[in-house]
Amino acid sequence: MKVGIYSPYFGILGGGELYLGTIAEILSREHKVDLISDADIPLASYQRFFGLELKDVRVRKVSSVPFVESLTPIFPVRFLRYFSNTRFTRDYDLFIILPRNFRIPFRILSRHKILHLQVPDKPWQRSDFMRSLSDFEFTQFRNQLIKKFRYPVRFREFDAVLINSKFHLDVISPWLVNPRAVVLPPPIALRKNPGWACKKNLILSVGRFFHGLHNKRHDVLINAMKKMSVQFPGWRLALAGGIRQDSHSHEYFRELEEQAKGLPVDFYPNVSLPHLEQLFTDAAFYWHAAGYEAPTDKPERMEHFGISTVEAMSAGCIPLVYRGGGQLEIVEDGQSGYFWRTEESLITKSAALILNKNELEPMSHAAVQRSKEFSREKFAEKLLQIVSSLQ
């Protein structure tokens, strides 16, 4: 087959790009695959950063497609551009698309279609619509109205809808008028397990430093370390992750540095892959706080899946993660790690592990075994089953 894989976010090295890039690598072994965007796609960076083999994958840049599914009048030129700029989708037997949240951006003319959804976008309630009107947020009102009535119908067009986690599927199921929704967890390159004897008194957390809906709540971890370090002065916390070149992200990072002054906390912004690999090797525990204090009606603030948690587990780190979102499908509480809901329970469970040394190595081994359920090999096996069912 000739396969086209489209994303409006190609150019950002994030989880969605790892997901689609891995699909491209797998399918390119037997099919002709194009990565498609209206922006530049740094293929070399993809291969280097994600460890992908994309030598047989072609990059195709297309003209941007105007958004015409709107309540505003459609001008003829804009309408013509829409039809002209979407003809390229006819070139493909299979077209895989990542939309902007729930906004399926254009018509797809290929024989087969697969949609990949990343964000658990909860359907609006009547109160949300009324609030947007009272606050004069007319653009938001328009977008949500379209999402509510138009896009659920468009989901029917697709042969399959790929979703990262059951948590995600449960949130969006009221939107999804498509019985072919499939939970396909992200592909994860498992780390080498160095063995428990190589572990140090180090706690690791990996996640981007940024304000926003999916904030990793580094502040909670720093505060927990402040309290725990009094009882266990030999332990340190390492915070690693990317940081964007914008003022808000850097301001957030400076706030964290200020909060951590004088504490056994080390920062690794934009850490290199070899250095990150060493942190995974050295760390005994893995902390994760995304979703902490998030309202129940804001599922997008939860951890949608938890790639870094699985990576840490594969390296033998014992995970202590916030009880919510996709993490519930990764960690087996009390067997391959622990869940926590309050800052106090995070500290208590971490302290209990440190004091009960007999529990450490068996739980580390269980974490490694559990991580194998989310390997790239498992991802490839399920993906190929889905694709072969279309032919």
Image (cartoon, helix red, strand yellow):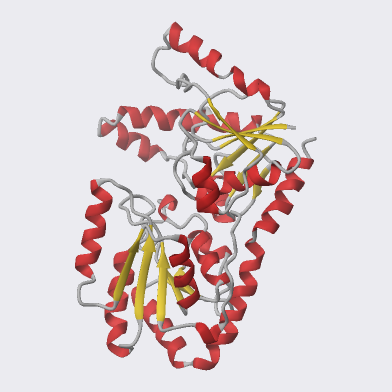
Give residue 341's position: percent from left, percent from top.
41, 71
Name above or below for residue 157 compared with residue 326: above
Q: Position of residue 223 (x, y in %)?
A: 28, 73
258 horizontally vs 150: left or right: left
Q: Is residue 45 left or right of residue 107?
A: left
Q: Which of the image's four quarters has the N terminus?
A: top right
Q: Nearer the viewer, residue 176 or 367?
A: 367
Which residue is found at the position 56% from the left and 51% from the top? 170
Closer to us: 328 or 297: 328
Q: Is residue 110 left or right of residue 175?
A: right
* Image coords of residue 168 (percent x, y): 54, 51
Please say whether residue 319 is visible from this viewpoint: yes
Q: Residue at x 35, y 32 (%)?
A: 140
Quarter of the figure with the C terminus: top right
Q: Quadrant of residue 25?
A: top right
- Position of 24 relative to 284 (above/below): above
**Residue ID at (45%, 20%):** 66
Residue 118 appearing in the image:
no
Q: Residue at x 79, y 41 (%)?
A: 389
- Residue 183 picture location, percent across and down: 64, 51
Q: Is residue 222 above or below residue 86?
A: below
